[in-house]
Amino acid sequence: MSPPLTWVNVPRDAKGLALLVEDPDASTPQPFVHWVAYNIPAGSEGLPEGIPLGDRAARPAGMRQGSNGRDERGWAGCSPDAGTGAHRYHFELFALDTLLDLPDGVTRGNLAKAMRGHLLATGELVGTYSRDD
């Protein structure tokens, strides 16, 4: 289930927000992508818990979801390998001066390219999670 998120101080001239969530401690060559979301309304103050998988999220209106590391569209929950210790989960929020016209299932790399030249502000939250087993 996707976590609830809140934020403040989005620039007034922002048209949309994008969110990337990655785990740099995963056993993959690149950080594991847990979430790619974009065209989040700039006036929103966060995301509710439990946004369902799919290209066009039911809430908030207009939000789109790209492909995560499991090749699904939406949140890929935290599931570090047992015995690997605490993993860091980087939640990066980007305020953009435009909405992005991207195909369904966009990847992290394609989203990053599309955001070039449109960035107004960024914010980051790092959380940790580990398995007991």
Image: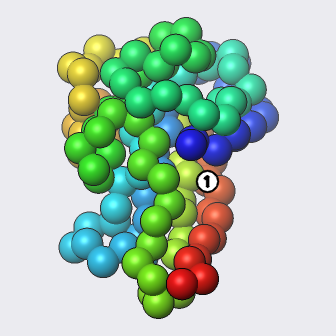
* Quadrant location, the C terminus: bottom right
In this view of the protein, can residue 116 be seen by the observer? no
Residue at the extreme right of the image, as rendered: 8
Q: Is residue 88 above or below residue 121?
A: below
**Quarter of the image holding residue 112?**
top left
Determine the residue positioned at 21% across, 20% down. Answer: 103
Residue drawn where x is 41% and y is 30% of the image: 53
Percent position of residue 8, x then y: 78, 34
Q: Nearer the viewer, residue 38 or 114?
A: 38
- Residue underneath mark 1: 124
On the image, the x and y values in percent for residue 88 come to: 54, 71
Q: How is the image coloured?
A: rainbow
Residue drawn at (29%, 39%) of the image = 72
Q: What amino acid does circle 1 point to?
A: Glu
Q: Quadrant of the N terminus?
A: top right
Q: Horizontal and vertical percent for residue 21?
A: 47, 51
- Judging depth in this view, the residue of 58 and 38 nearest the camera is 58
Asked if residue 72 can be seen in this view, the reply is yes
> Could you say which is closer to the camera, residue 113 or residue 70?
70
* Residue furthest to the top: 61
**Toward which corner of the image does residue 101 lie, by quadrant?**
top left
Q: Residue 3, how many percent across, how many down?
A: 64, 44
Circle 1 SS class? strand
All told, the count of numbered labels is 1
* Label 1 Cα neighbours within 10 Å, binned few <14 / some 14-19 / many ≥20: few
- Residue at the image position 27 percent from the left and 50 percent from the top: 70
- Residue 27: image quadrant is bottom left
